[in-house]
Amino acid sequence: MPHFDLCVIGSGSGNSLLDERFNKYKVALVDKGVEGHFGGTCLNVGCIPTKMFVRPADLAYAYDEATRLGVRLEPGQADWDQIRDRIFGRIDAISSSGRDWRIQNENITLIEGEGRFVGDHTLGVAGGKLTADRFVIAAGSRPHLLQVPGADEVTVHTSDTIMRLAKLPRSMVIIGGGFIAAEFAHIFSSFGVKVTVVNRSAALLRYEDWQVSQRFTELLSKRIPVRLNQQLLRLEPDEGGVLVVTTDAEGIEYEYGAEVVLNATGRIPNGDLLNLSATGVAMNAFGYVEVDDQQRTTAEGIYALGDVSSPWQLKHVANHEMRVVQHNLLHPDDPISTNHDAIPHAVFTHPQIASVGATEQELQAQGRDYVKSVQDYGAVAYGWAMEDTEGFCKLLACPHTGVLLGAHLIGEQASTLIQPLIQAMSTGLRAREMARGQYWIHPALTEVVENALLALPLEGYEREPDPVDE
Ligand SMILES: Cc1cc2nc3c(=O)[nH]c(=O)nc-3n(C[C@H](O)[C@H](O)[C@H](O)COP(=O)(O)OP(=O)(O)OC[C@H]3O[C@@H](n4cnc5c(N)ncnc54)[C@H](O)[C@@H]3O)c2cc1C
Ligand SMILES: NC(=O)c1ccc[n+]([C@@H]2O[C@H](COP(=O)([O-])OP(=O)(O)OC[C@H]3O[C@@H](n4cnc5c(N)ncnc54)[C@H](O)[C@@H]3O)[C@@H](O)[C@H]2O)c1
């Protein structure tokens, strides 16, 4: 049985861990692949391809905005084959050169297969077994599969398969109302597909701040049919596609037919498939591998990181945890801890959404003192240029200290505009010092952030009058 200094399970963030500082270690990298590809979710079926589809979708959808601003463009025609092949032509090449590089590394043995613990520090994989002094479990998560009658009898796509469709369908039902549903609803409807979103709860993106969730639900509902409060009953084959059958709270049944169905009902951490108890690694009640602030599991010498142990299920969180594990493996006598404060996220739909810190409903549930401000994009000069009627920046702060508690944006470039607010929350910079301690470029869209900061009704500060002539 081969023995290694270190075994890493998963070629996503786990693969990034193995830089040249690990050259002195004998390493096994075990990976079962995502849809047959090396390199994990983000590269192959996650962040990167989705955003590469969002960009052409934004351009196709810009036709609407251009018309509103007096520019006559032709309605967008998406060349699906060209877009898909351009995106995966680039991504698949990165994945396969990453795999080739690992095969060439003298100190690393790439073992392609599904690993499962069979004993203490012992992994069964590819028909054999290996042992290692240390393990890093970076096994990620997988799409939650629908457990309703008929789900096995029809083709149900997930984010793993939907981006490689052979042709653009005429119609699509998306089941779910979270990140993946929001992003693909924008992508496919911009490309001319008749999309219907069918969601179980009463609002889309319901974990966002309530005002953002409400605004997004309203905006997407103006664009495409959005059906809320729908309990999924069954799936049936239908002429040329699939019939999605649901029921509402009154028990009335509804049928939604489409050429293609996309299941976007969440992701499940992969720890349950690893037989972790064989090596003494515990999972929590939500199915995540239990880790402490140094990313150590309950078993000596075994670390976990990313989606398998992290409820945020975000790539920048997986990367941060990877760097902590990397340091702690290399410097066991001087370990560092993860910092899970002020974790931001963005949803790359239309309009974009970005958020950091607490939502208003969370602050209310915690019974915390807070003040808020909500500034419309349309109230600043760049927002006038855009004739924007949709976007806003909402800030929540401690009324006594001015420390920011949460920031939530919906609108153009929200994922970029939020960065100074993330920095303020990470460094403890207070709202008034942030607003008045630096220049804000005029008339950039960032003025919406400046104005939201100044509009917070903080103790000890008078509200500045709104500028009348800038
Ligand atoms: C459609 C989509 C869009 C996303 N967009 C964003 C975004 O815009 N921004 C963002 O921050 N996050 C986004 N995410 C989330 C992000 O992709 C994940 O949080 C991140 O990739 C998790 O990285 P990881 O290293 O934990 O796991 P992964 O990258 O999933 O790597 C896990 C690897 O382990 C392998 N594996 C699993 N079990 C075993 C086993 N038993 N034996 C051997 N190998 C195994 C898998 O095959 C896989 O290669 C998106 C996710 C999806 C699905
Ligand atoms: N931009 C990003 O950062 C990004 C993009 C995509 C995915 N991700 C990550 O991937 C994770 C998974 O995304 P997701 O959208 O699948 O999950 P999610 O948890 O965001 O949303 C799941 C949705 O499915 C609904 N749902 C669950 N079961 C259902 C059922 N039986 N019938 C109808 N609706 C049902 C839920 O109400 C919810 O709206 C996200 O949590 C996120 O961390 C991130």
Image (tube, rainbow, N blue to C red):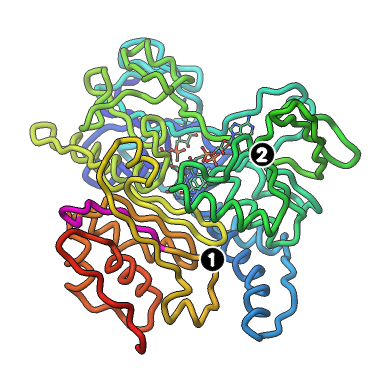
Quarter of the image where ligand 2 sits: top right
Left-right relation of 257 to 11: right
Residue at disc 2, CB closer than 8 Å to ligand 2: yes
* Vertical relation: 187 (above or below) 386: above
**Badge 1: residue crowd in 10 Å (few <14, some 14–19, many ≥20):** some
Q: Where residue 198 sits: x, y (%)?
A: 68, 41
Q: Where residue 413 sits: x, y (%)?
A: 45, 67
Q: Residue at x 70, y 43 (%)?
A: 227
Of badges 2 and 1, nearer the viewer stands: 1
Q: Residue at x 23, y 27 (%)?
A: 292
**Badge 2: residue crowd in 10 Å (few <14, some 14–19, many ≥20):** many
Q: Which residues are magenta?
A: 393-402
Tell me the SS state at disc 2. strand
Give me the disc on residue 390: 1
Front residue of 304/237: it is: 237
Front residue of 218/134: it is: 218
Most extreme residue toward the bottom, as rendered?
469
Give me the disc on residue 382: none
- Which picture quadrant has residue 298? top left
Residue behind mark 2: 175
* Vertical relation: 445 (above or below) 37: below
Front residue of 291/228: it is: 228
